Image: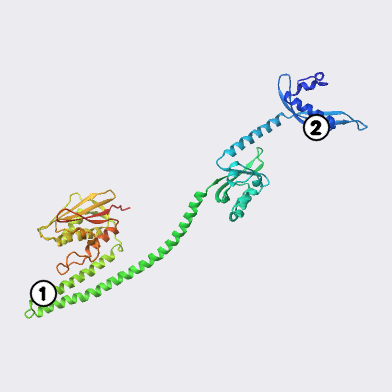
Amino acid sequence: MSGLSKKQSLGRGWQVAIHPDDLKLVETQAQLILSKQKSDKTELRLQDPQGKITWVLSEAVVEIDEDGRIVGYIGTVVDISERHQIEEALRESEGRFAIMANSAPVMIWMSGLDKLCNFFNQGWLDFTGRTMAEELGNGWVEGVHPEDRERCIHTYTTAFDHREVFMMEYRLKRFDGQYRWIFDTGTPRFNSDGSFAGYVGSCVDINPRKQVEITLQQRTKQLTRLNTILAKTTTLLQQRNQELDQFAYVASHDLKAPLRAIASLSEWLEEDLADQLPEENQHQMQLLRGRVRRMEALINGLLEYSRIGRVHTELTQVNVDSLLREVIDSLQPPASFHIQIQTEMPTLVTKRVPLQQVFANLIENAIEHHTRVDGRVKISVRDLGKYYEFSVEDDGPGIPVEYHDKVFVIFQTLEPRDRKENTGIGLAIVKKIVETEGGSINLQPVSGPGSTFRFTWPKRSLE
């Protein structure tokens, strides 16, 4: 190890083999043990003539003769270069780990075989505002929220006993006294020989996410409760609707029967008293039958209005051009009345009957309220992407702007009922149908005479 011969080493020759930086240390140690006559153990470097350095462990023990007198020292020098390299590498590794751990954007901790924590990085200490000494061992548990402490310790010790990875969430007190939700992941660590060495873990602050989760859980509970109430309300509403339907049909039958009887009686009276009934009384009989017809139309209109949205209708492909021609044919407008349908009307998937009702009401209104028998009605359409916009435009007397919203109100009429029989339900039915199907309707202001009703109708698919 020294590269010296025995002759070169005797006396003080051996000092040539001591590394210059360690020579003073050796001399000091030698003087110390000689003065106190004690044993010595020192780590130092030997350097041979070629410059090779060897780390050694030098041990010296006192040599005593038979009379117990110290006669000198006996020593050994052992090559510990490999061990020293390992220790140096370990120190470098620990240094790199400390730098990395303290620079990491997460909180890091480590524990040993005794389950006690023996390291916390600077991130953890900055978060808690405590010292390393306060956190070591089980000191860190003091910062865990009392409600989470038992669960937290149980999770850690159970995983430790089984050498398993664990993940847990708990509240940890921050340096300002505020508890924050932490996500902690612990992983078992092992030595190079495979033996278990303890745990290493990392923690991140998840308080914002956790607050959102807690809020969502609360909202979910509220929604569950509201859905339960809604389900009960829906069931009750369905029962009430069934009762209402039954009542409506019974009431309709019971109301219409006496109305028909009144109309028939008035006709019989006119026939029986044909020669005796003055002209004024005959006019009154006609007014009576007109009121009966209005009442019957009102009952039918109310029934129709009440059923909108509560009667299931299947989706089907509808050719709007064919539908309009059927509607016009059923209304039987005067031969001199002209109804123009835009070419290339769409074919769409929808509920046929509601769309038919809307067109029938709008076209019928345009005919009935027109002041001339040679009036004109134009029906057109625009494609708005997810909707079609239909227009029903007439050249009649028009509707004053102040009534544009009122015409859709139930029972609202613009002419006295004595002058024109009208229930005031037709446009209310149209508005309710259109909005139930997901569209909208309005009366467009126009310059000059006439009215233009525009309504949107959604496009659907059979899927």
Crowding around mark 2 (Cα neighbors within 10 Å: few <14, some 14 to 19, many 20+) is some
Check the image and report above or below for 266 versus 315.
below
Q: In the rendered image, is residue 201 in sight? A: no
Q: Is residue 72 left or right of residue 158?
A: right
Q: Which of 52 and 203 is in front in this view?
A: 203
Element at label 2? strand
Q: Is residue 67 left or right of residue 266?
A: right
On the image, numbered disc 2 is attached to which residue?
A: 40
Q: Is residue 173 left or right of residue 414?
A: right
Query: What residue sits 43% from the left and 61% below the top?
Result: 226
Badge 1 amino acid = His
Badge 2 amino acid = Asp
- Quadrant occupied by the N terminus: top right
Quadrant housing residue 286? bottom left
Element at label 1? helix
C-beta proximity under 8 Å, tags 1 and 2? no
The outermost residue toward the front is 176
The outermost residue toward the left is 275
Query: What residue sits 38% from the left and 67% below the top?
Result: 236
Question: Which x, y percent locates residue 457?
Answer: 26, 54
Query: What residue sits 65% from the left and 49% below the top?
Result: 139
Crowding around mark 1 (Cα neighbors within 10 Å: few <14, some 14 to 19, many 20+) is few
Check the image and report above or below for 386 versus 221.
above
Q: Which of 347 and 3 is in front in this view?
A: 3
Q: Which of 97 and 187 is in front in this view?
A: 97
On the image, numbered disc 1 is attached to which residue?
A: 283
Which one is earlier in the sequence, the residue at label 1 or at label 2? 2
Question: Which x, y percent locates residue 25?
Answer: 76, 28
Query: What residue sits 15% from the left and 71% below the top?
Result: 290
Q: Name the disc covering residue 354, or none.
A: none
Check the image and report above or below for 92 versus 446.
above
